[in-house]
Image (cartoon, rainbow, N blue to C red):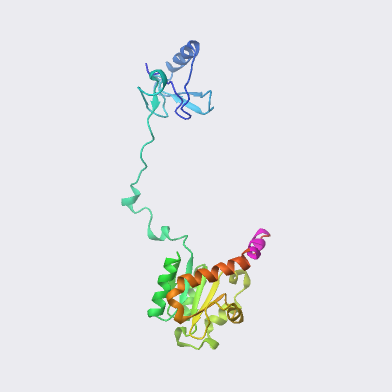
Amino acid sequence: ESMITHCPKCNSMLNFSDAQQQKIRGALATVGSGTLKLKCPHCKDQLELLADGSSADWRQKPGAGAKGGKMPDPPKPPDIDWLTQGVFEEKESIKDIPKILILINAGETRDKVVGAMVESFFQPIAVDTVAEAMEQLRVMQFDAVILHSKFDNSPFITSEFHDFMKKMPMTRRRYIFYALLGPEFNTLYTLEAVSNSANMVVNERDVEHMKNIYKRGKTGYDELFGPYISALEEKGRK
């Protein structure tokens, strides 16, 4: 006979008395192809026994445990069929990556900024027109926006997009890190950023270091405004 000797859940030895074993065998004789349910006296978890007295939870094998007792087999390897079935499509794998909207004219500067943002674990979305940028903001939630002062070949002082960002309701604006890039700005000059209703300014000559510049600027922003935003969220306000 193959009466269970160890709990397959906690691996403790089941020291059934002769009377208990006889009672269990009597009950097992009536289960047929079903199982007999009882509790482990150690972990109190439910055990299921097959008609021959072995565990339905794990197959038992001889040669392990004290006095030749039987120990459960290890768990089976995980199912990795999803590797070849395409279960995790690209859209699913990137859905939680923060998005950054990039308004920089196509060229070397934009390529460098996009590369830096990818290295910073962002999903960069570069646009070519203000209308396209507006549409992206309408349908998506962005964690950050980078605007070049000469984007779409329009003067920064009359920039339609910059005016849009300045007038955006704070319930949304405070959750977007807004950075300005251009030849007229002084990198990480906070006073200049504030005067332009932005969170960070970057001179385009420093674009080679955009990854570290962004990290520095965002860290300072989080240290300053993070507690305030957390307090608003605790009070149910955004």
Tell me where residue 60 sits by quadrant.
Answer: top left
Q: Residue 198 in the image: x percent, y percent?
A: 57, 77
> Which residue is located at x 52 percent, y 79 percent?
187
Badge count: 0
The answer to whether residue 168 is left or right of residue 131 is right
Position of residue 94 relative to residue 59, above or below, is below
Q: Residue 218 in the image: x percent, y percent?
A: 54, 69
Does 73 lie within the magenta span?
A: no
Closer to us: 38 or 205: 205
> Which residue is located at x 50 percent, y 71 percent?
214
Q: Residue 98 in the image: x percent, y percent?
A: 48, 64
Range covered by the magenta-colored residues: 227-234
Q: Name the image quarter holding the C terminus.
A: bottom right
> Which residue is located at x 57 percent, y 82 percent?
163
Closer to us: 87 or 219: 219
Tell me where residue 1 sits by quadrant.
Answer: top left
Position of residue 63 relative to residue 190, above or below, is above
What secondary structure characterizes most of the magenta part?
helix
Q: Residue 65 in the image: x percent, y percent?
A: 41, 23
Looking at this view, name the residue that lies furthest to the left.
84
